Amino acid sequence: MLVVDAVIPPGDEPHQAAELDLMMMASFVGRERTREDFVDIFAAAGLRLSRIVATPTVLSVLEAVAGE
């Protein structure tokens, strides 16, 4: 499965995904997620995060496969 979403990188360095996270929390119920968040979400669905492909934008492509 492919998911296109912003992924908050580890650490406290400024990043567009972190800014989006603040806007999402202030305006909506949603939030942006870290790699670890996606690992947990995929695992709950029986999937395993196989890789994250960065793009020139704030969005990344996350690839999930059937869990092993």
Image (spheres, rainbow, N blue to C red):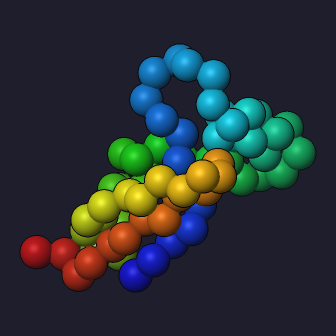
Q: Residue 22 placed where, x, y %?
A: 76, 34
From this viewpoint, which residue is outermost toward the left?
A: 68
Query: How far across and how far down the image is residue 63, in percent?
Result: 37, 71
* Residue that appears at 89% across and 45% down: 27
Residue beneath the point at 54% across and 56% down? 55
In the picture, the quarter occupied by the C terminus is bottom left
> x, y (%) of residue 4?
56, 68
Residue at far top of view = 12
Image quarter hosting the N terminus:
bottom left
Q: x, y percentage for residue 2?
A: 45, 77
Q: Nearer the viewer, residue 44 or 53?
A: 53
Q: Is residue 19 left or right of residue 55?
A: right
* Above or below for 22 versus 6: above
User: Residue, x 83% and y 51% (percent of image)?
Assistant: 28
Q: Residue at x 43, y 65 (%)?
A: 62
Q: From this view, report whether residue 56 is shown above or below residue 11.
A: below
